Amino acid sequence: SNLVYLSDADSILKVERKILYSILNSNPKRADHYWFVHIQVTDEPYTQEYLVSKLSPHSTKIIFRLGFRVEQKINRFLKYVIAEQIKRGEIPEQPRKYSINKNEPVLYHVQMSDIKFIVQKEYLSTYNDLNFLDTMVMKAKFLIKKFTVSPVNWFGLENSSIAIENTPMIM
């Protein structure tokens, strides 16, 4: 199986603390491969590029550079990148262990396991030592986030392959 985290870190070699917390501390998650995806929107309208960095044998960071007019269907782009990695032999094929249909069609001519997106929603932890003003600023930030478009809708993720996880923000 593949676990995908949407990353805020724009460096090809960095992964945020909240993602590591999710994988290791809060209900440890197992996967054959971990994908850390960052999306950069460019000023050129139709840019479709990606950078790949192998962080370990079982984890990869991808930066998608997409033009502001390109529909951000990250699910489709990610499946393409995984298929390319399999074709080049950089990761092994991922045959499905359980399937209703034995002759299930393969995507991009490779066998690919399931993909699950972990969408993280941060909340202000009660263990913070913030003064009144800082606490109010952080509460305002989270209030504004409630009115913005969710990453699920913004990046065109399939609803059946998403887990929403609450992560504490400790400052």
Image (spheres, helix red, strand yellow):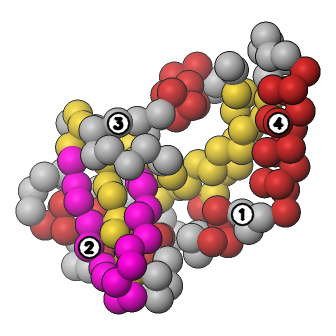
- Label pair 4/3, CB-CB below 8 angstroms: no
Q: Amino acid at mark 2?
A: Glu
Counting residues from the start of the chain, the first of labels 2 and 1 encountered is 2
Provide the secondary structure element on which disc 2 rests: strand
Residue 49, labelled with which disc?
2
Q: Dividing the picture into quarters, in which one does residue 141 lie?
A: top right
Say which of marks 4 and 3 sits in front.
4
| Dot 2 and dot 4 residues touching (CB under 8 Å) | no
Q: Which residues are magenta?
A: 37-53
Check disc 1 and report its element: helix, strand or loop: loop
Query: Which residue corresponds to mark 1?
Result: 150
Say which residue label 3 marks: 14
Q: Which residue is mark 4?
A: 137
Q: Earlier in the sequence, mark 3 or mark 1?
A: 3
Residue drawn at 60 percent across, 61 percent down: 161
Is 147 displayed left or right of 72 in the figure? right
Task: Determine whether the residue tagged by mark 3 lies in a helix, strand or loop.
Answer: loop
Q: What is the C-alpha distance between the residues marked 3 and 1?
A: 23 Å
**Residues at discs 2 and 3 in contact (Cβ within 8 Å):** no
Amino acid type of the residue that numbered disc 3 sits on in the rendered structure: Lys
Residue 65 to residue 166: above or below = below
- Residue 9 relative to residue 170: left or right: left
Q: Position of residue 74 (x, y in %)?
A: 47, 70
Cα–Cα span, label 4 and label 1: 21 Å
Mark 2 and mark 3 lie on one chain; the one further toward the N terminus is 3
Which residue is more in the foreground, 134 or 108? 134
| Residue at (55% x, 55% y) in the render | 117
Q: Within 10 angstroms of label 3, few (less than 14), some, or many (20 or more) residues? A: few
> Overall secondary structure of the magenta stretch?
strand
